Amino acid sequence: MKRILVTGSVGQIGSELTPALRDRYGSDNVIAGGHRTKPSKELLDGGPFEIVDCGDLNQLTEVIKKYNIGTVYHLAAILSAVGEKNPQLAWSVNIDGLYNVLEVAREFNLAVFVPSSIAAFGPSTPKINTPQDTIQRPTTIYGVTKVAGELLCDYYFKRFGIDTRGVRYPGIISYVTPPGGGTTDYAVEIFYEAIQNKHYTCPLKKGTSLDMMYMPDAIKAAINLMEANPDKLIHRNAFNVTAMQLKPEILEESIKKYIPEFRMDYEIDPLKQGIADSWPDSMDDSCAREEWGWKPDYNLESMTKDMLDKLSIKLLKN
């Protein structure tokens, strides 16, 4: 079979998607690609690893040819809060890198998964049950690159017939790899602090509502979409997907069921709060459900229990 390349395999999503793909398709058939961040021992021991700088078209091309790649999960990106501190880098990584991946896909007829984000929406977007197709107009460089990426992927499908697919991820909660500078990182940090210190200072104000998803569902969404019947896909590159709508105080109360002494206070980060306020409260993911059968497995209660169990074990080992 043709092999799979995962760019950004050492990041929050990639570090869990790569092993899941290896379990599904065989360890030697999934190549983990990374650039600046040192890969974990588990990632290195689990199958092939290559240094992949998506900004270097020649290097990317060589990896595609060396491993006979047929599908790319392109996860390498600069996230929202980090992007606001270095917008030039965000554009270079998120757009120039994607352009190179799409050009290689055009040359070698590859299938490409490219995640978009809730950040692709902006202040003028309807905030409640945000439709699949609606005004976007984001106000962060991360969001701008995500809208541009959605349009680029649409263009390469319509103009060149490249099999591009993608979802708009909400905030993702996970325990394997720490998040990498996103606005919704608090929803991961709160679990670490609850277990270790029984206290957390939240950077977003009480009542800030954002869509969230547990990592196993994020992995499921990516794989299921790439395995879906293309004839049934109308939107292809920017499917809204979500699992739960969370506010900081709701997450606090969910954790308190297992750690009653946990307490949370607030110290608002103006940058992160401004970004969060520009995003939807909730997304309508009915198109994903109808076109390729999207359905999350985890809700708030099951996610909280599993996250606390798995993270406690991880922290004990460290």
Image (cartoon, grey):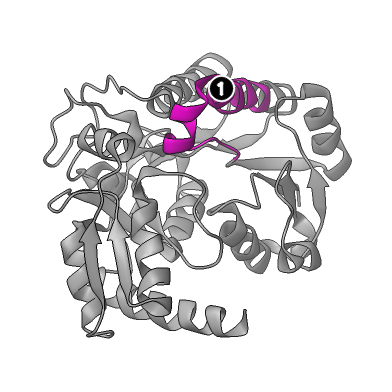
Q: In this rendering, does residue 295 appear at all?
A: no
Q: In which quarter of the image is residue 294?
A: bottom left
Q: Position of residue 140 (x, y in %)?
A: 36, 25
Q: Report the span colored magenta.
A: 76-101
Considering only vertical position in the picture, is 148 above or below 309?
A: above
Considering only vertical position in the picture, is 235 above or below 222?
A: above
Residue depicted at x 17% and y 73%:
253
Q: Position of residue 105 (x, y in %)?
A: 67, 28
Q: Where is residue 156 in the image (x, y as percent from the top left)?
A: 54, 20
Residue depicted at x 34% and y 30%:
120
Most common SS among magenta residues: helix
Residue closest to the eye, 19 or 267: 267
Q: In this rendering, does residue 177 appear at all?
A: yes
* SS assignment at label 1: helix
Q: Quadrant of residue 109?
A: top right
Amino acid type, callout 1: Ile
Quadrant location, the C terminus? bottom right
Q: Quadrant of residue 129?
A: top left
Lateral position of residue 23 relative to residue 225, left or right? right
- Count of numbered circles in the view: 1
Q: Mark 1 points at which residue?
A: 95
Residue depicted at x 45% and y 65%:
216
Residue closest to the eye, 269 or 289: 269
Lateral position of residue 149 relative to residue 306, left or right? right
